[in-house]
Amino acid sequence: MTDPVAPHPPARLVVLISGSGSNLQALLDACEDPAYGAQVVAVGADRDGIAGLERAAAAGVPSFVHKVKDHAERADWDRALTASVAQYQPDLVVSAGFLKLVGDDFLGSFGDRYINTHNALLPAFPGIHGPRDALEYGVKVAGATLFFVDGGVDTGPIIGQVVVPVEDDDTEETLTERIKEVERRQLVEWVGRLVRNGWTITGRKVMTK
């Protein structure tokens, strides 16, 4: 008779937010299932008084805030953010609506395990107005991209993508909302797959093990 194999402890997630925290909530809900394989161990933000921090508190998850304006130099903010995230020893860091670009210190520590989601099908339409730019260009499909963050703007290796058809009567607001729905599901699905299966990054190619 062989000894039973001890279950792996859940992967440690640190989630970074700037607003309402709807993606954070989706991850918190997913983590309630032990089979998901992850636990949100901390939430970081770049501002006070946001709903996402209330969600963290309601879930009993510790949080921290680092405002760029509280630091003399942007690099000082980056180092402070890096130090706070590192305290929680994350297996994966998730940008869930985090509106600040991290710097060299952060990427040096977490660049191969820091993921972000973008509301366009990269490499098309990077930046903060993905759905608007897609509509103005006249595309027939839009969508969302999950990727590992590098030093560029929405330029890192792609983990997953999901397509959303563009309707003739779409506005920026209606398209954005439909993208958000699939974007959230993609984030939850892939975070689970990454932490359960592991991953490798070779050049621009991301493979799950």
Image (cartoon, rainbow, N blue to C red):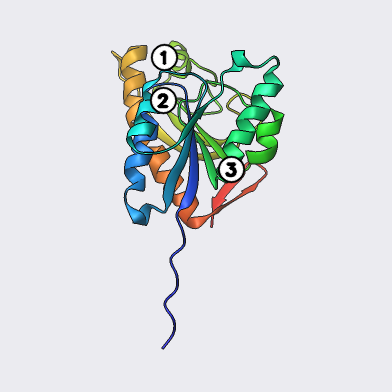
Tell me the SS state at disc 1.
Answer: helix
- Whether tag 2 and tag 1 are in contact, CB under 8 A, the answer is yes
The three-letter amino acid code for the residue at tag 2 is Ala
Tag nearer the camera, 3 or 1: 3
Q: Position of residue 72 (x, y in %)?
A: 69, 14
Residue 151 in sight from this viewpoint = no
Residue at the disc numbered 1 = 135
Residue beneath disc 2: 142
Give neighbour class at mark 2: few <14, some 14-19, many 20+ (Cα, 10 Å).
many
Q: Is residue 88 above or below residue 80?
A: below
| Callout 3: SS | loop
Q: Nearer the viewer, residue 176 or 22?
A: 22
Let me know if residue 187 appears in the view: yes
Q: How many marks?
A: 3
Name the N-terminal-most of marks 3 and 2: 3
- Looking at this view, name the residue that lies furthest to the left: 169
Q: Viewed as shown, does residue 16 lie left or right of 170? A: right
